Image: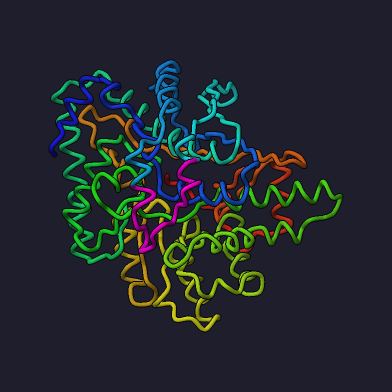
Amino acid sequence: MSIDLAQRVHNHNWRLDPHVRSLLDTDFYKILMALYIWKNHPDVRVRFTMKNRSKARIRDHVGMCELDEQLRHVQGLRFTESELIWLAGNRFYGQADIFPGDFIQALRDLQLPDYRLTMNHKTGDYEITVEGRWFEVTFWEIAILAVVNEARARGAMKGMSHYQLKVLYANVTARLVGKLKSLREADVPRIAEFGTRRRHGFLWQDFVIEAMQEELGPNFLGTSNALHAMRRGLPAIGTNAHELPMVAAALARIEARAAGVDGAAALADSQFDVLRKWQETFSGNLLVALPDTFGTTQFLRRAPEAFPDIARWTGFREDSKDPFDGAEEKIAFWQALGEDPRGKLQLFSDGLDVGHMIDLHRAFGDRIRDGYGWGTLATNDFRGCDPRGISALDPISLVCKVSQVTSEHGTIGAVKLSDNYEKATGDAAEVAAYRAVFGTEGVADAPVIV
């Protein structure tokens, strides 16, 4: 490890190591989605809300002033010219000129809107909300999550001696290397680093990427973090997320209310309208669908008629369904369309760790083109490694989702149903209205790992 992480943490000098140090320090799919938003919904306004799905409280390790200082630092960031040149001139997924000049100018002019950091007295923990133009607010999501997770980790490490920190990082490094060697020995292919949103810290994520590159060799695809990809000359990995269909569905609900009509058909179709607009901008390996926003089973049942072009898409990302059930469902879907599943991507990405990836590859490696987005348990697996014998460094399940959408015709709460009842978000009445349209087939109760 070229950087002495123990010494850097022991010094607690955040001006040398801010939790987020660039607007490019985000998941690549955020930038792709920003292009989609800028092109299709320039005037839509949204609210994002951070939610802690874990029992552990953030406030137990982080003071509000410290958190506010880090968030204020992020708000002052701007895209640099070198970063914009990288976005404008690079090839992503084999495609050149993905980002047009006027979009690059919009990024150059981007200033993040104000945020609101408060204490939620019902939960006894911090709440962060951001409101404004969707194109601007969307860049806050990953930054908020990265800031809060690193602030919590640093808070948990305060008071540790330099020796204890050395032991901590030695323990975690040994665990990481052991995981990577197991993946290499099992020859698990197409592994990408997906850990920005819940990372232990920026520098540790950089080391994890270096280790993956060294140990996995050609089985390492790259990283979802755009800044690390630029600095290390790696492929930037990512396509789209739940945010797009959540907003599309909310807009359909607003339009129906304004017109005084039922709107169920428009709501059901909104998930496919996103895909239609996405393929107007992107092609090839960027055509990867995330079907579980309102339930995967209903999506797959409706897709062949509602969106026949799905047959030529590259594949799917699996996020909230049991991955074995999800893969079987996708294989059956492709076969029903007359497509060979062995040529279609199934990107697993929900709470993965080494055992999951090895077992999934053994089960599906010769039946579908399996890939793996390895996130929290790559960049933040400090479980049991603290020499003090405490669990304050265990990862928590923190999300920052669209909670409200506003167009010229009104305002409404946003909803995500998921394939897991525990991951549903939104006002109870709105969730019930969505379930009346989308149903609950294939939805299950499962513990939220990360």
**Image vertical order of residue 310 relative to residue 105, above or below:** below
The figure's colour scheme reads rainbow
- Identify the residue at horizontal 37%, vertical 58% (top origin): 92
Q: Position of residue 420 (x, y in %)?
A: 55, 53
The residue range painted magenta reads 86-105
**Location of residue 308 in the rendering, given as x and y in whole percent from the top left corner:** 60, 74
Q: Residue at x 19, y 60 (%)?
A: 217
Please tell me which residue is depicted at 54% across the width and 37% down the height of the picture. 136
Left or right position of 290 against 27: right
The quarter of the displayed image where residue 6 is located: top left
88 falls in the magenta region: yes
Image position of 437 (left or right of 69): right
Residue 336 lies in the magenta-colored region: no
Q: Nearer the viewer, residue 379 or 285?
A: 285
- Give 449 or 188, whichever is nearer the viewer: 188
Quarter occupied by residue 404: top right
Q: Farthest top residue?
A: 65
Residue 108: image location, x then y, percent = 45, 37
The quadrant of the image that shows the N terminus is: top left
Count of picture labels: 0
Quadrant of the snapshot with the C terminus: top left
Q: Spot the residue most to the right.
A: 260
Q: Is residue 102 left or right of residue 395?
A: right
Residue at 39% from the left image edge and 50% from the top image edge: 88
Closer to the camera in the image, 162 or 338: 338
Most foreground residue, 244 or 296 = 244
Q: Position of residue 190 (x, y in %)?
A: 30, 63
Query: Is 274 on the left or on the right of 355, as rendered?
Result: right
